[in-house]
Image: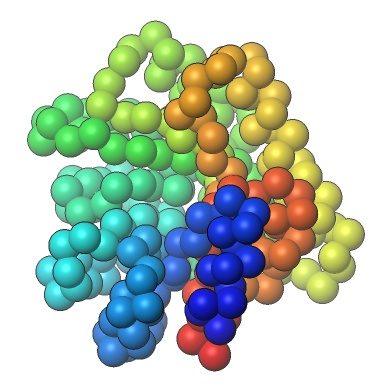
Amino acid sequence: MYKSLVDTLEKRYVTLVAVTKTRPDEQVMALYDQGQRIFGENRVSELERKSEYFPKDVEWHMIGHLQSKKVKSVLPIVSMIHSIDSVKLYDVVVKEAKKIQKPIEILLQYKIGQEESKYGLDKVSLESIIEKYQNHPSLVTIKGVMGMASFVDDEQQVRSEFAKLKSLFDDVKERYFGTDPHFNVISMGMSGDYKIAIEEGSTMVRIGSLLFK
Ligand SMILES: *Cc1c(COP(=O)(O)O)cnc(C)c1O
């Protein structure tokens, strides 16, 4: 599964974040042995444990909701946070990055689904983060956006939610980032919907269960 998935993704210039939550270490190591280096976790305690256990050339991504009080623990471990879902969380990440002098990449999580994910920015708070970002340079780099579609069987609905994120990305890129090459990530698509996400413009998929079948 892994090799054929990676081949498909590479052809489309899509980056794979292998989501390892709840998986035994042997299964995660098997992916590492096949060449995977970017792993995603949604819990701070697991990031702390796994980052100790696995080789140091793994890039850890925080993909789940992050409480402000946990930023301090997570920041030294991860290279990217996908789930910046409030202005307050952004401010705390900026502050902690400065404190430990660590550059960090982030994605702004935009609410595209219905009730399923309670987390995510609306357009106003998303733009207020970008304005702060542009007015106050820091060790944080905004790389793009992240979103989760509703967990429904209705393919059209999922497709239109992903299209919404792509169009938000295009709009924000044009209005705020111009030709800045750093703003280039659209993190969308999981095991059940990554094909649709790629058709709608995803550049980074977060896939767990499918990898372990
Ligand atoms: C668990 C999780 C995934 C991966 O889900 P699968 O359906 O196992 O591929 C992706 N993104 C987030 C935020 C997750 O929590």
Residue at x-position 16% and y-position 62% = 56
User: Dividing the image into 4 quarters, which one contains the C terminus?
Assistant: bottom right
Residue 101, above or below 113? above
Q: Which residue sits furthest top?
A: 135
User: Dividing the image into 4 quarters, which one contains the N terminus?
Assistant: bottom right
Q: Give the quarter of the image for residue 172.
A: top right
Pinpoint residue 111: horizontal percent, then vertical percent: 63, 45
Residue at x-position 65% and y-position 50% = 202
Residue at x-position 35% and y-position 47% = 80
Q: Give the quarter of the image for residue 179.
A: top right
Residue at x-position 24% and y-position 34% = 103
Query: Would you say 159 lies left or right of 91 here?
Result: right
Instruction: Tell me which colouring the rendered structure shows.
Output: rainbow
Query: Would you say 131 lies left or right of 161 here?
Result: left
**Residue 120 in view (yes/no):** no
Pinpoint residue 7: horizontal percent, then vertical percent: 57, 68
**Residue 24 in view (yes/no):** yes
110 vs 168, nearest the viewer: 168
Pinpoint residue 97: horizontal percent, then vertical percent: 20, 33
150 vs 13, nearest the viewer: 13
Residue 118, above or below 173? below
Residue 87, above or below 115? above
Query: Would you say 193 lies left or right of 109 here?
Result: right
